[in-house]
Amino acid sequence: MRQIQAGRLLVLWILGLSSTLSAASDKEFRNRYIAEVNGQTWVLNLDSRRSFASMISAKLQMGDALNRMILLGNIDEGLITGTYKPLRVSAMADEKIFTLQWIDDRSVRLTLDGANALARHGITLRADANVNPVDDALVGRWYSDVTPGIDAQNPYMGQQWSIQFQDDGSLCEDSRRVDSRQPPQDYSPCEQGSKHLWKAENGKIHIADDNGNWSLKFDYRLMGGRLVVSYPDGQRRIASRPDQRLSAQ
């Protein structure tokens, strides 16, 4: 009788294990994901040679080769949770928490506890080389300071440049006349401005023409919450988000 009960327990345990493994594999992770973060290319490589189906290890390169992390976690229904630490440190280094959420067949969202604000909020990485890499830190609307003196008849009239980066890979850009005496307005450059596909690669923004040909638009840096843009001809612009501009008044 005891042998029969033990056999039933073994069968139930095997069935339970099988259901756990199948649940873990419902949403398959790719071996390599890429994202642009603050002008740097992040590469996440997941180890496909796993000893256990419910566990996974990965290496994250955050820009340069010296800034690399090792991640080790458990996978369950499209979510990997675990700890990470720098790759080249002592075994006693503090480990911090990470999560890797499966979004769809081509993308994941990585959250790193204890990292910069952007990584703590979550970074979307993509596996499809045909999907244009976008820098999540740029997504949203940006406005330059008003450039006065564009109208000799009206010295208060100025020009303001605005740009809107969208996470679907599209970009809107607009320059309009504004009254420098008026408080800053929050508007979308997509209302009237030109629209292009964009991608970010190592601190450079490229846009595509109607034929799908890519060209350099400008170099960019994020400094103190402001976007610094440098064009190939030497022109330079500094922009900020609408909430920063309004709070500065």
Image: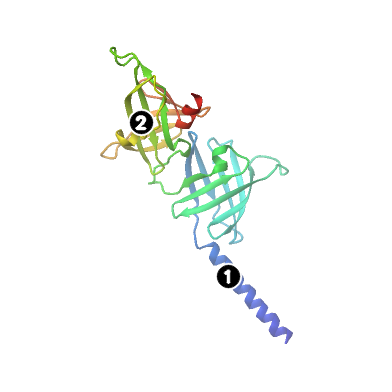
Residue 138 horizontal side relative to residue 81, left or right: left
> Is disc 2 surrounded by few (<14), some (14 to 19) or many (20+) residues within 10 Å?
some
Q: Which residue is mark 2?
A: 216
First in sequence, mark 1 or 2: give its number.
1
Mark 1 and 2 residues: CB-CB less than 8 Å, in contact?
no
Q: Which mark is residue 42?
A: none
Residue 165 visible in the snapshot:
yes
Furthest residue in direction front, as rendered: 182
> Is disc 1 surrounded by few (<14), some (14 to 19) or many (20+) residues within 10 Å?
few
The structure residue drawn at horizontal position 34% and vertical position 23%, both measured from the top left corner, is 178
Q: Secondary structure at mark 2?
A: strand
Q: CA distance from mark 1 to mark 2?
A: 51 Å
Identify the amino acid type marked 1. Ser
Relative to 230, is 213 above or below? below
Q: Which quadrant would residue 231 be assigned to in this image? A: top left
Furthest residue in direction left, as rendered: 211
Residue 77 horizontal side relative to residue 105, left or right: right
The structure residue drawn at horizontal position 62% and vertical position 73%, both measured from the top left corner, is 14
Q: Which residue is mark 1?
A: 18
Q: Quadrant of the N terminus?
A: bottom right
The structure residue drawn at horizontal position 41% and vertical position 34%, both measured from the top left corner, is 141
Residue 152 on image: x %, y %: 29, 12
Q: Secondary structure at mark 1?
A: helix
